[in-house]
Amino acid sequence: MRAPWEEMEPASRHSVEKQHQALRRVEQLGDGVFAVAMTLLVLQLVVPQFIRQPSEAALQHALLDMSPAFYAYALSFLVLMMFWVLHHFEFHYMTRSSGTLIWLNALLLVFVALAPFSTALVSKYAMTKTAVFFYEGNLLAIQLLLALTWRHAVGSGLLFGGDTPARVVRRMRRALRIGTAYLLLTIALVFVGPHLSMNVLLGLVVYYVVLTAKGGYTLELRKAKPPTPGL
């Protein structure tokens, strides 16, 4: 049985180039929004203010009080970087765009741009349940839209012409589903303890870092051993 993207007729060279250009513009918009969102995260860190020159102990105490803000910043930066890598990997295998892809990407970027606000929320309100629930709900929306984007790309033949192995399609789908399930778990843990939920979220970052760093674009963690010479 042929994959959906293998059943389309080849296009002319000019048409293929136009499709690639359209796809790159969609991807570049995403790159720009991710970059701005990650940059805005640091603006949530406000330098402590003092009426007069503080003592060493006072400054250290003020910085210690900012530890939730530093933690929220670092975690959010890693999470946004994780989502950007997944977004990049998806577009790596696409060869054409579509109207649905454009709007799915636009909706995804709505929630990416919201990330600095949700980060500021958990930073300012010391990991309260409402703040963490809002924050992780925002991340879940991004994760779901990444999954929908990949599903649309596969089902609508946007991978056609890219020589994408079926096993890569399955691995990406499985990785996105695991991420969605994991985020649902972290949201459920909010009601057990906000700090616990935020700490468990780091596990998802570790999973995707290992998967994309070791597995590369094929997401293949177990590399096939080369045949032994003479056998």
Image (tube, grey):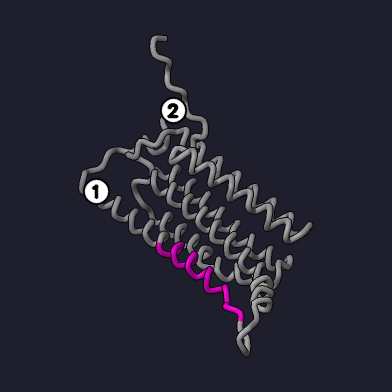
Using the numbered discs, state the Cα–Cα distance from disc 2 to disc 1 in whole angstroms: 27 Å
- The residue where tag 1 is placed is 15
Give the left or right position of residue 69, taking residue 161 as reference.
Answer: right
Residue 175 image-quadrant placement:
top right
Q: Which mark is residue 27?
A: none
Q: Which mark is residue 1?
A: 2
Residue at x 41%, y 58% (from the top left corner): 102
Span shown in magenta: 32-48
Q: Does the magenta portion include 38?
A: yes
Q: Quadrant of the C terminus?
A: top left
Residue farthest toward the right in the current orientation of the protein: 192
Residue 70 screen position, x and y as percent: 61, 66
Q: Which residue type does callout 2 highlight?
A: Met
| Mark 2 element type | loop
Vertical arrangement, residue 231 with respect to residue 210, above or below: above
Q: Quadrant of the N terminus?
A: top left
Give the left or right position of residue 129, taking residue 136 as reference.
Answer: right
Residue 143 screen position, x and y as percent: 56, 53
| Mark 1 element type | helix
